[in-house]
Every structure is written in structure tokens, then in C-alpha cells.
Amino acid sequence: MDLPIKPWDYQKLLGKGINVDWSKTRKGRKYYNEQAVKDFKKAGISHVRIRVKDEATEELMDSLDEQIKDCLKNGVIPIIAYQADEFKKNPSEKNIQKVVKWWATIAERYKDYSHLLAFDLLIEATDKVNKYPEKLNELYEQVVTEIRNISPTRIIIISPRMRSDADYLKELKIPTKSKGYIMAEWHFYASGPSKTNKRKLWTIGTEEEKQLITNKINIALEWQKNTGIPTWVGAWMPSNYNDGNDYSISEQVKFAKYMSTQLKNAGIPFAVNSDTKFYDRESNRWIEETRPVFESIFSSK
């Protein structure tokens, strides 16, 4: 029998996960297959954040159906995360309604699926919505109300503005219809550390650099304590893979070990960014070059 899962229990179940491209890009959809899920599970991945940017068409949902079923069958927790780009660029009432409709379609489609499936309402607030935190809260209020009409007890995840910065968790208004089945997502280093940017600086792992990480974790822990709502880190990347990628493998391992250990010690689950950096979906093989980085995160218990 499928029973609702309390958010604090769900937080413990999430463990270490990874962001996946399976439904986000044409290539991701083309090469997706169940073997990837099996390989992920075997490698120690306990959840996947399935990012979606497209309209909720029948074609998209057919592929999502397959991915979610494969995950549940193989013991990997699936989380659907939506980009909602139009809303982020222009947080108008019209665009709020588009997001509400998208999630209503998804909620209806998966209303009878396992409670292990969760909904991550917005992949990092950016662009114009950063200037309008009240619009972000309004979006969450309306979307949660709509989902609750369909799924009273599924876990819903909301995130703060400024690219899900933990500093802004305090601005979140908990939706009135959340009914206790709510979590918050926050993240940092989603596009990796930097050797020059002071906000995400990591060179050799100085005390100051380590403190940048622990400070954010402590902010999240404090918010959890004050609100009674658990959190999850939805994305962090071991190197600036998409922007120079100027960290050696040993440097990446050092950063990844520190990051994953600190989050684990804090009891905060996380999803690494992202699958294609570690796994070749066309051949269903792990990428040898980044294997030490992957193992430094997922092989340690």
C-alpha cells in the first residue's frame, strides 16, 4: 500500500542524487533507457532530479511516464523539476497561470503514482523574478493550491530567489494549502566553484573557502529549525565544467569530497550536477576521466 511520506522521512530517503537530462533536451530523450537507471542505482545514486523545460505535451509525458516507472521499479526516487522560463523572465499573472496549468497537468497525470515521486516547482528563480519575491510567493501559493486539489499529500518543493540562494529562504511564504507535505530546495555551486569569483571561490580549499560552504549550510539548518521544514540541495557541480573547466581531477576530488561530506554531516541530501558529466548515455558507460570525482561523492557511505 502506498502511504504518504512525511517530509523529514523523505529527506532521509533522498540521500545522494544527480540531475538528469532525460526530459530536458532532445538528445536526453533520444538516448534515455532503463539501463541508465540500473547503472545509477548500482553506483549509489538514490534519487534523480528530472529537469523539464517544455510544455506538458503527450509526447513529453509519455517519456516522463517511462522514466518515472523505471526509477520506481529500480529503487531510485524521481523528482520532477520545472524550468518555467517565461515566468522567470516576466512574472505576470498570465505566466503564473501557465505554470499553474503545467503543474495541474502533471499532478493529474501522476496522481496515482507512488508518494516517492515529488514535485520541484521551479528550477532556480532568476532573471526578472529576482526583483519580485512577492510574485514568486504568489506562484507557489497558486500552484500548491492547484496541486492539493488533485494530490493532497504528495511532497511539493519550493525554492527561494537569487538562484535558490539559502540566504533568501527566510523570504519564502509557506503556501497555505501545503498541508505539511512541503520541503525547500536551495543550492550553491550549481555551475561549479570558481578560482576568481569571491562568492564561490575555491582554489586549494583554504579555511575561508571552506567557510563559504559551511556558512550556507548553517543558514539552511537554522531555517529548517525555525520552520520545521526540511531542505534539499538540488544542484552542485564539482568543477566549472561549462565555463572553462580549469580544475584538475585531483582538485575536483578535493572540492567534491569536502562538499559532499559537509552536506552529509548536516543531514542535507543533494543532487550533483549533472549526469552527462559522468555517464555516457549513448554507450551506457561511466566516463573514465571523471570517474574518480564521481566515486569520491558516491562511493563513500
Image (cartoon, helix red, strand yellow):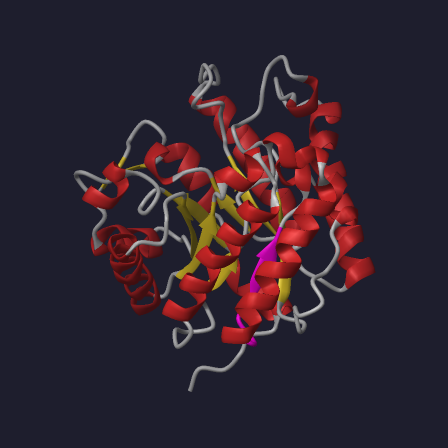
Residue at far bottom of view: 1
Q: Position of residue 300 (x, y in %)?
A: 48, 48
Instruction: Locate residue 63 relative to residue 102 in the image: left or right.
Output: left
Boundaries of the magenta span: 152-158
Q: Does the magenta stretch include residue 157?
A: yes
Residue at image coords 51%, 22%: 251
Instruction: Locate residue 66 relative to residue 141 in the image: left or right.
Output: left
The quadrant where residue 105 appears: bottom left
Q: What is the quadrant of the N terminus in the image?
A: bottom left
- Does the rendering let one see residue 294? yes
The quadrant where residue 63 appears: bottom left
In the image, residue 257 sits, relative to residue 152, either above or below, namely above
In the image, residue 270 sits, relative to residue 14, either above or below, namely above
Q: Position of residue 217 (x, y in %)?
A: 71, 43
Residue at image coords 72%, 30%: 212
Q: Where is residue 109 in the image (x, y as percent from the top left)?
A: 37, 68
Residue at image coords 57%, 53%: 269
Residue at far front of view: 94
Q: Does the magenta stretch include residue 174?
A: no
Q: Where is residue 220 in the image (x, y as percent from the top left)?
A: 73, 48
In the image, residue 192 sits, relative to residue 70, either above or below, namely above
